[in-house]
Each structure stands twice: as C-alpha cells, then as structure tokens.
Amino acid sequence: MKEIVKIGIIIADEDEFLPLEKKAAELKAQAIMLFGKKALQFNVSGNGCEALVTAILCGIGKVNAATAAAFLAANGYGIILNCGLSGGISGVCRGEITIPNSFLEHDFDLTGIGYKPCEKPGQKYIYSADSKLTEILNGIVHGAKNGTAVSGDCFVSNNELRESLKNNFNAMSCDMETAAIASVCYAFGIRFAAVRKISDDAGADAAGDYRALNQLAEADLTNILLLAIQKIITA
C-alpha cells in the first residue's frame, strides 16, 4: 500500500493560478470548490509514494492566505507550498526567482506601546521556511535568491516604504501572503516553503511593472512546484 502525502498549494491571484489550470487535463486534476474558493485536486505518484495535491486560489492578502492555510491544516495536509509574484526590495532584480528562507509581517505594528516593528507579544513572529523543502527548491532553481520575505496588506509602490522595509527588516522581497501562511504553518507544525518571482522594484513604477508581468501568466513557478512535489515524494 502506497504512503499518501497530502500537499497543499496556495496561490493568491487568478493569473498566477492560470498556468496550473492549463495543466489540469495533463495532471488529471479535478476542479472543485473549497469554502467558496476555486481549487484543483490531483495525485502525483513515484517511488512507492503518492501525493494528494490540493491547490487553492485563495485570493489576495494575508487573511485570504491564512484562511486557506488553516483549511489545509485542519484537513491533515503536512506540507504547504506557495508561489506568486513579489516586489523586489534588496539584492534582487525583476524577473529573478526567489526562495525565501524567512518571513515576517511588516505591517504588524505595536511600536506605539513599546514593541519592536512586527513583534507579536509572547509569540514567535519571524518564521522560517522548511530547510528540506528549500533545499529541494534551490536544487531545481540554480542561482535562486534566498533571504527574508516581508508581507503586508498593501501593494508596496513607493520608494520610502521600500527603503523602510530594507532598513528595518533587511528584506529581500515583499508580498501580501507568505508570512501569513508561514504563521499558520508554524502554529500547526506544517512544513512550508515558497517560490516567488520578482515582478517589480516596489517603487514608483511598481504597479505597471507588476501588471505587465502578471498578465503574462507564465508557467515557470508552476513547473518548479510540480517538479518539487515529484522530488518530495521520491526523496
């Protein structure tokens, strides 16, 4: 009897989800709805193991991403992966692939009552990606950039905020989901990793650059995750 590994994929945006939808027939994936969200479910086999993969189009933002992660956690998924586009903060260029190794919520702010930026009283607030998953992803994407991804419920598109994220958090990139997923995964003891492509420089031209890349709906991140899943179950 094959061991079944349950792997969740969380994707925020319609255009980011589209490449996986285009592969649905090839993957023999079933289109389903989960808590009102579009999802795909399919199986991947190899080396005596089988993965049940559920990919959820969660919607943009931390609450949507955390909801999807909590749903997967409550239904026994032991691994969660994420892909999408990110703004570049430091040491990365448009079009580069990043595999973050730490995550934090840059817009969590209790500095007014004496805490450090993003500090959550009495709990962990900087989360780490699973080292074995990031090793697999780095093995697939040679030369991928590793560093800190910061998340917040805003699209970063001004130089002042970008510099603040660089200076306060040593951020490599910014997005609106990864730290929320990482927080849920930490709470439930779930392995998590993300692979993100830099769409813009998080500055004044960010919106146009992001839209131009997002509308291409490129398949590279989807292909990386599918290859990673195959390696996860055959390791």
Image (tube, helix red, strand yellow):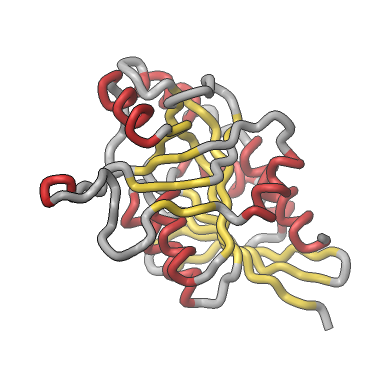
- Farthest residue to the top: give it: 205
Residue 191 vertical placement versus 157 (above, below): below
> Which residue is drawn at the image coordinates 44% and 23% (left, top)?
200
Against 34, residue 216 (above or below) is: above
Residue furthest left as drawn: 112
On the rendered image, what quadrant is the C terminus found in?
bottom right
Q: Which of 169 and 80 is in front in this view?
A: 169
Instruction: Name the residue at the bottom extreme.
Output: 1
Residue 88 lies left or right of residue 192; in this view the side is left
Residue 203 appears at what percent x and percent y?
34, 19
Vertical placement of 169 versus 123: above or below?
above
Q: What count of labels does the image hold?
A: 0
| Residue at (50, 46) in percent of width and height | 102
Q: Residue furthest front?
A: 114
Q: In this view, does 103 lie to the left or right of 45?
A: left
Question: x, y (%) of residue 14?
Answer: 45, 44
Quarter of the view holding residue 30: bottom right
Q: Residue at the location (51% across, 77% down)?
A: 75
State which quarter of the image contains the N terminus.
bottom right
For image coordinates 35% across by 16% down, the residue present is 205
Q: Position of residue 162 (x, y in %)?
A: 33, 25
Left or right relative to 107: residue 223: right
Taking the image as shown, residue 15 lies to the left or right of residue 227, namely left
Residue 111, image x, y percentages? 17, 45
Q: Which residue is at the front of the view, 223 or 181? A: 181
Which of the pair 33/60 is nearer the observer?
A: 60
